[in-house]
Image (tube, rainbow, N blue to C red):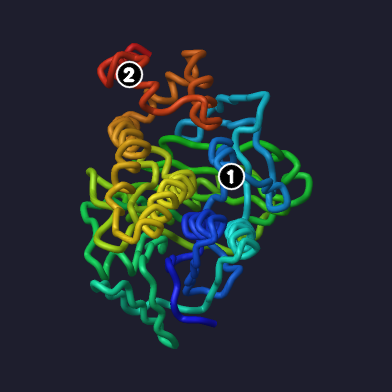
Amino acid sequence: MKQNYDVIVVGAGPAGATLAYELAKKGIGVLLLEKEKLPRYKCCAGGLTNKTVKLLDFDISEVVEDVVYEVSFTFNLGTPYLGQHSQPLIYTVMRDAFDYFLVQKAQQLGAALMDGQKVMQVEVSADGVEIATADNIFRSRFVVGADGAYSVVARELGIGRDREYVAGIESEIAVSDDELAKWKSRVQMDLGCVPGGYAWVFPKRNHLSIGVGCLTSKARQLSRHHHKFLDSLSIGNYTITRSSGHLIPTCTKERPVWQDKALLLGDAAGLADPLTGEGIYNAILSAQLAAPVIENSLAHGKVQLEEYQEAVDEKITPELRTARVLSKFFIRFPHLAFEMLKRREGTWRTGCGLMTGELQYTDIKKGAGGFKGVFNLLFRT
């Protein structure tokens, strides 16, 4: 395999694979470097909102585990509120299959992949970028960090700071066929049983994905809360087939997502939703924002990656800023959020709009007359 490319993308998750797909579609020489051998298991609830799926220009049905039309909400494991919608809200996937599916889409268009290659060093010079793994040295005109919460690219080049992390514990749970059928097309979310966070159940084809998450500052008892939530579900005899933890990075304030000949995508850029912890939507969107900027820079023979920062600041940053303010309130007053859901008919419709992409956080803020209006609604509940 050749060692020189137009662009090297570090990390073959949704952000990196999407960027490789978009660049290869334009005939740009792109290499995906992935430290694990693919396909690889990824600790994740595996829920793709409808708005996320709409970003993609190809069908993903072959890797969809279940299609969700209902969400059951509880507060501190109490009586549920069941929200239903006529259109799909969430598609559940296993991340090993979904991520590899995206990588294969990129490969079909000409993107190169080298997995099992952990990046050790990244150096940027006037001549381009040099990337060293344990086995090889690769060179390119640009490098992209799509390598998650512990981004080597961000660390090596000193891009970005001021992050806050959400800690999560996720378990894959085998249950009886009868029990599995009860969860078909339905997600459960609990507010309140995890201080500073929430718990969830996502249905898959042959099992349930059950987890808990909260700010790392409140995560000391997270494992205990996970077991408590599991016991509360009354799912009969079950087997934990896999369990692991992960961190989701969110920015506490605006930060640079590029530097010189490098840029960051998705979790590497801290673009996860501070309210829900969902990261795949902004991972894919950031890749799609980066692709034309890189293409333009290559076409004109000069570095113009600041245009990517401008695109992120226009399309993503306002949403993150609004979600960050809302998350601080909901973390402190989850009971008010649940009461608003139960008592105000429009709350569920708003949630559906967020999942389908018909609404954004900034639309909610604007419609309520700013944050003050949102908070007034909550406190009048």
**Can you say whether 292 is above or below 114 in the image?**
above
Query: Could you tell me if residue 253 is visible in this image?
Result: yes
Q: Secondary structure at mark 1?
A: loop
Could you tell me which quadrant the C terminus lies in?
Answer: top left
In the rendered image, which quarter is residue 96 located in?
bottom right
Spot the residue most to the right. 178
**Can you say whether 87 is above or below 301 in the image?**
above
Query: Could you tell me if residue 172 is visible in this image?
Result: no
- How far across and down, in percent of the image, does residue 239 sit? 65, 60
**Can you say whether 135 is above or below 372 in the image?**
below
Q: Marks 2/1: CA distance?
A: 32 Å
Q: Secondary structure at mark 2?
A: helix
**Can you say whether 339 is above or below 213 in the image?**
above
Would residue 365 be found to the left or right of residue 89 on screen? Answer: left
Would residue 65 be found to the left or right of residue 7 on screen? Answer: right
The residue that appears at 49% across and 15% down in the rendered structure is 346
In the rendered image, which quarter is residue 328 located in?
top left
Name the residue that disc number 2 marks.
Answer: 374
- Which disc, if any, is residue 56? 1
Could you tell me which quadrant the N terminus lies in?
Answer: bottom right
Q: Amino acid at mark 2?
A: Val
Q: Nearer the viewer, residue 235 or 182?
A: 182
Q: Amino acid at mark 1?
A: Leu
Would residue 354 be found to the left or right of residue 376 on screen? Answer: right
Q: Residues within 10 Å of mark 2 (few under 14, many from 20)?
A: some
